[in-house]
Amino acid sequence: MKLSLQRIVALAIKELLAVIKDKRSRIVLVVPPLLQLVVFGYAATFDLNDIPVAVYNEDRGAPSRELVSRIIGSPHFHLTARVDHDAQIAPLIDNKTVLAIVHIGSRFSADLHAGRGTWVQVIIDGRNSNTALLLQGYLREIVGDFNLAWSERNGLPPPVSKLQVRPWFNSNLVSRWFVVPGIVGLLALVVTTIVTALSVAREREAGTFDQLLVTPLRPIEILIGKSFPGVLIGLVQGSFILLMAVYWFDVPLRGSLGALYAGMLLFLLSAVGIGLMISSLAVTQQQGMLGAFLFLVPAVILSGFATPIANMPEAVQVLTYINPLRYFLIILRGVFLEGDSYAILLRYYWPMAVIAVATLSVAGWLFRHRLS
Amino acid sequence: MSSAAAARMRLWGMIRKESLQILRDPSSIAIAFVLPVILLLLFGFGVSLDARNIRLALVVEQADSNTASLTGAFAGSEFFAPVSYGSIQEAEQALVGHAVDGVVWLRNDFSARLLGGGVAPIGVFVNGVDANQARITQGYIQAVWQLWLETYAQAHGRELPAPVTLEPRIWFNAALRSRNFLVPGLMAVIMTLTGAMLTSMVVAREWERGTMEALLVTPVRIWEITVGKLLPYFVLGMGGMLLTVAMALWVFEVPLRGSFWVLTATSALFMLVALGMGLLISTIARNQFVAGQIALVATFLPAFILSGFIFEISSMPAPIQFITHVVPARYFVAILQTLFAAGDIWPVILANSAALLVMMLFFLGLARRKTRKRLD
């Protein structure tokens, strides 16, 4: 028996209608992703801007004033308080009024003018260790610039060696360029999984799935028909977010759209496969929803979306190999920022293809074999 | 029978009914106990911002004792896993092909310039796609280089020409162990999830099956239904919470500097907020599909991204900062991070608890109002 295109198209249309004919479902498909894109696009950044700091300057000389103005003139910091005795330090940090206090001792200018090395102390709130680390980096940079300027003005010898640091692909290290392409994958995964995870379960609950099985439709035709809405909705939403990323968030798109869409298609197929597998295992919609939840939450957190996979312990890293989002995020960022070619991306394409084939076959097999 | 006794009896009956329902349906017990444990284990180990073994390409065009001491410094650092490349072209190829995360390049005139009294430049390229990791990598490269410079200057009797040195004092987490702030943050994310899921799905189920209407025509009052539904799930949720605290302390070895009773009290408050949120969602949604969907969109992702658990709220644009005020996890994350790392700092705890209290009254009040409206 040959595959019938007519039957597949009919089923695909029916499946699509099942998802979008309900007004509430349509709203759920459009509004939350849009809101999330805008909110998360702006919120999910590791760059530090306007970090509240306090200055405790016991020195009255010009050099200390110069250093202070360099710090509070930086876009990273915002002067929130001035401190004039030690007892004020602890409450400011404890109560999170400021995240750092720059403390310049009374001999700062005198030491500098005398040609002795001096120091500036900075007390940092370590509750968020990543912020503390970055804050320290920004301050080190400012002090380094101050040192260079001071040495030059006072005829001191330059350091024997110099680091010429050049970040590739993202020369200003804007973390939004990293996060926004990731949101394409994140939201596409959420919507496709939810749409497909309920498609079989809904029919099983209503009893119409058994009817579908006794029609002339072959399991593979059912599989294609059921995959269609998820892939289509994912493609539409993904394309929309892509446009927003380029034209609203100004993320450079350096690689080819073809390489990106090849990745997106494979990614959506694997997401649909996982969704359908969950759905065929579930007896009720609630179980389907719960299954989607249990897949989505770890898939998002262990994808490299916010924290690098390389930092994970070996065992958890192995687990991420079955997560399609892991590969798609690399492809998205690779095409957007690095302009990666098909050749480089090939090793991220095929694992998704394997996941798609495996999960779709299991789902198709389960259609007939999970008759409870 | 007095009316007070009757009310007590009705309330007791509701609690008993809900408790029995929980005991007979293992799925809510799984959500309360198994889910938090698995998620915390997975994420507690999986989510880390501490870069270790950064893959670094080293290109030394002319090897001698000076370059050897510098490459040795990189090899000895716990942060780097250096790989040697013969030429800068090969190293750049490796950077483009994702085989390394950064390149350190010592040109063939490095030692000549170093000894000639000039400035010997060191080329450093990092893959800037992950801006945060790139910054951290740069920082570590800088630190290794700085240390090498000091040793070199000492060995050659040269004065280090650094007029001002920065002396950072990191409070609360001197070792900058990211797990110490990520695990308490994860507890807030996971508790939002389980709390909201516990009530959102189960109450929606009651609406869907029509048993809610049956309940509403009995003499049981609305508040008795609310309390009767909340109390058993509250007990369940707090059990899960205690489990995650125990794991934070003994599995992840996060030090708890605050007192245990403050932790318990604030957790109880937060649990009520999360349950109230779930109750409200299920009352509005009335079907399990929409309830589950809203619970995912309204609880997990905001708690993950907008709570300050990983992304610093003070760095967000003002309108987004404003939005974070309606995310309950934001207040609980602030409380947990302070309690674990710093101790019982009352201004932080009281201000955030007050916000949670307001949210709890809002969610429960609204859920109760919406329930009554259905009777019209």
Image (tube, helix red, strand yellow):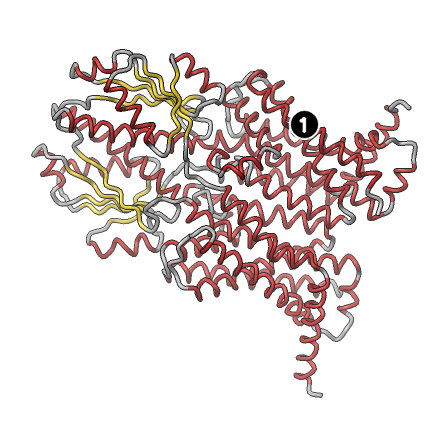
Work out which residue is located at the far left of the displayed protein and give it. A114
Left or right placement of residue B373 versus residue B297 in this view: right
Left or right placement of residue B356 versus residue B141 in this view: right
Element at label 1:
helix
Work out whether residue B267 or residue B145 is closer to the camera in this orientation and state it: B145
Neighbour tally class for label 1: few under 14, some 14-19, many 20 plus, Cα within 10 Å: some
Left or right placement of residue B241 versus residue A9 in this view: left
Q: Tell me residue A199's x, y (percent).
A: 77, 40
Asked whether residue A62 appears in the rendered view, the answer is: yes
Q: Residue at x 60, y 22 (%)?
A: A260
Q: Tell me residue A50's x, y (percent).
A: 36, 41
Q: Residue at x 72, y 57 (%)?
A: B204
What amino acid is labelled 1 in the image? Val
Q: Residue at x 78, y 48 (%)?
A: A283
- Compared to residue B65, the image places residue A126 above or below, namely below
Asked whether residue B272 appears in the rendered view, the answer is: no
Occupied quadrant, residue A204: top right
The N terminus of chain B sits in image quarter: bottom right
Q: Residue at x 73, y 63 (%)?
A: B24
Which residue in the protein does label 1 denote? A354
Work out whether residue B65 or residue A333 is closer to the camera in this orientation and state it: B65
Occupied quadrant, residue A150: top left
Work out whether residue A210 or residue A319 is closer to the camera in this orientation and state it: A319
- Compared to residue B85, the image places residue A20 above or below, namely below
Q: Tell me residue B366's x, y (percent).
A: 62, 61
Q: Chain of mark 1?
A: A
- Compared to residue B97, the image places residue B342 above or below, namely below
- Compared to residue B63, the image places residue A86 above or below, namely below
Q: Tell me residue B208's x, y (percent).
A: 77, 57
